[in-house]
Amino acid sequence: MNQQSSDRVVIIGGGFGGLYAAKALGKAPVQVTLVDKRNFHLFQPLLYQVATGSVSPADISSPLRGILSPYKNITVLLDEAVDLDPQAQQVVLQSQTIPYDTLVVATGVSHHYFGNEQWRNLAPGLKTVEDALEMRRRIFMAFEAAEKETDPEKQKAWLTFVIVGGGPTGVELAGAIAELAFSILKHDFRNIDTRATRILLLEGMDRVLPPYAEELSANAQQALADLGVEILTKALVTKIESDRVTYRLGDRTEEVTAKTLLWAAGVKASSMGEILHQSTGVERDRVGRVMVEPDLSIPGYPNIFVIGDLAHFAHQDDKPLPGVAPVAMQEGDYVAKLIKKRLKGETLPPFRYTDYGSLAVIGKHAAVVDLGFIQFTGFLAWFIWVFAHIYFLIEFDNKLVVMIQWAWKYFTRKSGARLITGEESLLRVKVDEQGEYYTPETNKNQLKV
Amino acid sequence: MNQQSSDRVVIIGGGFGGLYAAKALGKAPVQVTLVDKRNFHLFQPLLYQVATGSVSPADISSPLRGILSPYKNITVLLDEAVDLDPQAQQVVLQSQTIPYDTLVVATGVSHHYFGNEQWRNLAPGLKTVEDALEMRRRIFMAFEAAEKETDPEKQKAWLTFVIVGGGPTGVELAGAIAELAFSILKHDFRNIDTRATRILLLEGMDRVLPPYAEELSANAQQALADLGVEILTKALVTKIESDRVTYRLGDRTEEVTAKTLLWAAGVKASSMGEILHQSTGVERDRVGRVMVEPDLSIPGYPNIFVIGDLAHFAHQDDKPLPGVAPVAMQEGDYVAKLIKKRLKGETLPPFRYTDYGSLAVIGKHAAVVDLGFIQFTGFLAWFIWVFAHIYFLIEFDNKLVVMIQWAWKYFTRKSGARLITGEESLLRVKVDEQGEYYTPETNKNQLKV
């Protein structure tokens, strides 16, 4: 490999992994091109707050060009990788083909419906800004439809929310919807009592937050129950219809009638996983993530790295590293450091993830924190959660306003971003021939994920 | 008319007029139903700031239910009026029919393309949140497309913005785009110099801001020119194509090649104007606004009022009252007061609008203020403009964050809401068979306006 100052590094994806790699190469003697199909970095851990109307998309997003504009050796390209030629060292983008000396792939994951792609429109997931706005529309439209409904059975269906998946996203969504129904919205309607809302969290494993310590799961479960969320563990969803979820609970099959179904259950690799497999023969795991070497490169291609959620790194524990922001950040930093070392003809020991702890928020004043040596819940956990998130938000874009917005919400119990917007927002709760209310499917299936 | 405590007031539209009428009836012995097809009130005077990426939609919107929840005699209905039966005193909504004793129509206006409806997709207007997000997408996508373009002619077309209409919206849009191109974005691109951007403001009259005093128009024109905006007055647009605007300038016909065309030129009455005309025979003006009586009712129907932009009130000056927020607010207040007086069997003198002045902002630190007895421009005008707007924003929803966001932007010259979002955001600048770049038309023509 030519390791001159003209070394060309191409990074695909501007999430936590790609962005940290780019920033760490910002002063290095390399030419960096960061490719992303969006013009902004999204702070995904707070996306559920957009979905539940607490903050606006721009509050948790930062324009990539703005973040990277101080680094004159970095070019941002709004484009999407569609193919790869590892022999010619070229990435094929939608509008051009670009050469690389080193390639960093950080394109993440998308929803996984376990072979039931038809569930996508019935129970949308939460990965993009558009996903979050669609969830927000469905959640607030459900209360509006219930307010108009005169049939008590149908009203009940509009006031029933089912969240599939008890990981951090599912837990945080359930907690935030409980806060809406039981507190924020309780004086806003005249025909319904939002406190009659039923929020059901279905988890396939035997406890919520399976990756956390058991005691913490139990605490989270208690905090959710205190908020009014019903939790069913060992519940395997077998069928999703427009107003019904069927699940297996042990030997029994049960169903619940609900108009609003939200998906927080699984992820699969983005299309770059398949492209890498086809072009380099690299192995993948069950959900399509790329099996990486101890230095995050792929076998036989020391100049191609895969980082973040797309990488399956199995060289540290008996299980792969989790798909969370801190892993992606550290991997991005590591790869940048390795590239800089190689420029000088030096090497670096294998990547090692340092786990500073896990966090999940369950509602106002309730969160769970797992710092490895200690686990705790409650107000202090919530406080730590807020400040950990704001610390990273501020790092990119000085989003002071988010902190002020939270403080404001905290003291007033208001929630200012409850807009029903988008093409489907304009009064699309209608009655069909059978007298059933329906919300037409959105065009989201036409979206690339 | 039965004027018991059971008096039923139906208000259609939750803009400035409808909302002020509702709030003023909040403690009165009447049952109020506010109907709106959106679940939020929009602070339309700041919509251009959403379109140019300064603030998020939620920052200038407030949920109607939240604003009105303290008033137990007010019910909010998310619905749309589609017909009226003034004899039976009933409004037909999409999902039900509701009776009224008094009806207040405040549904405003939409864009007017002067019989050229095919221009709608080529040069979108600015009335709704979706309009603003579509403008934002087009503006920021234009810079992205220019960055990728290698043909200098095409690059120039992407860096040319034409705004049709030199009223407050056109002037504010032109100023904000100039700020983006010449200041905020100037370090963000590598292949283009955003300072080469051309911003053209076309106005059909002989000066910008025609309703203001002449001296002020001249000052605004100078301020825009200082910002780098080219202004063409007496320019009548005759043709709009996807990358070209043709206009008549005196005897000459000229054209300009531009990829981004924005419409700020005219309004027409919303569909309630036509419905009122059909059902009551009320007269309308050239753009469909309803000719109202001195007390804002319509001839022969003392219990039907029309307020805000939809009303043509010609009893004060030789021209109708302008379609601005202060007029709508005062009309809403007046009608509420009249309804309360009638409950007691009393009367009220005809409506009179008190003009406290006009404001328009031209860019950072530049605005024009016309207080009637005095006109001025510059920093002080800008300062007054900011605080007048924040005063009204805070009234509804304590949107302190907007003030902080502006203060932040002021000190950092950052602009945080530059997201390209929506279904059309995902990399849709493509090359067609002839090698031309294009952005596919959005689905906005399917939207109800």
Image (tube, coloured by chain):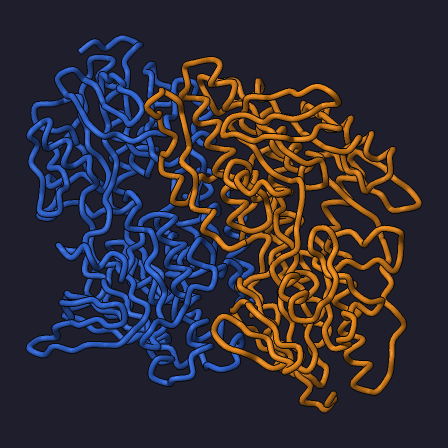
Chain colours: A blue, B orange
Q: Where is residue A442 in the image (x, y as percent from the top left)?
A: 34, 55
Task: Tell me which residue sits at (33%, 67%) in the image.
Answer: A174
Determine whether B52 is above or below A250 in the image. Answer: above
Q: In this view, does B103 lie above or below A176?
A: below
Q: In this view, does A225 lie to the left or right of B153?
A: left
Res A272 visible: yes
Residue B247 placement (x, y as % from top left): 65, 26
Task: Provide residue B200's location: percent of width, then percent of height.
Answer: 64, 26
Q: Nearer the viewer, residue A351 or B91?
A: B91
Snapshot quadrant of residue A382:
bottom left
Q: Quadrant of the N terminus of chain B?
A: bottom right
Does residue A184 appear in the picture of this structure?
no
Give me the residue at 87% from left, 63% from top.
B352
Q: Quadrant of residue A279 in the image? A: top left
Q: Nearer the viewer, residue A221 or B444?
A: B444
Residue at the location (35% across, 26% down)? B432
| Farthest right residue in view | B373
Residue at image position (80%, 75%) is B337
Give coordinates of residue B289: x percent, y percent. 71, 57
Q: In this view, does B317 lie above or below A5?
A: below
Left or right placement of residue B326 versus residue B112 in this view: right
Count of residue discs: 0
Find residue A236 and report its image quarter. Answer: bottom left
Residue B364 to residue A9: above or below: below
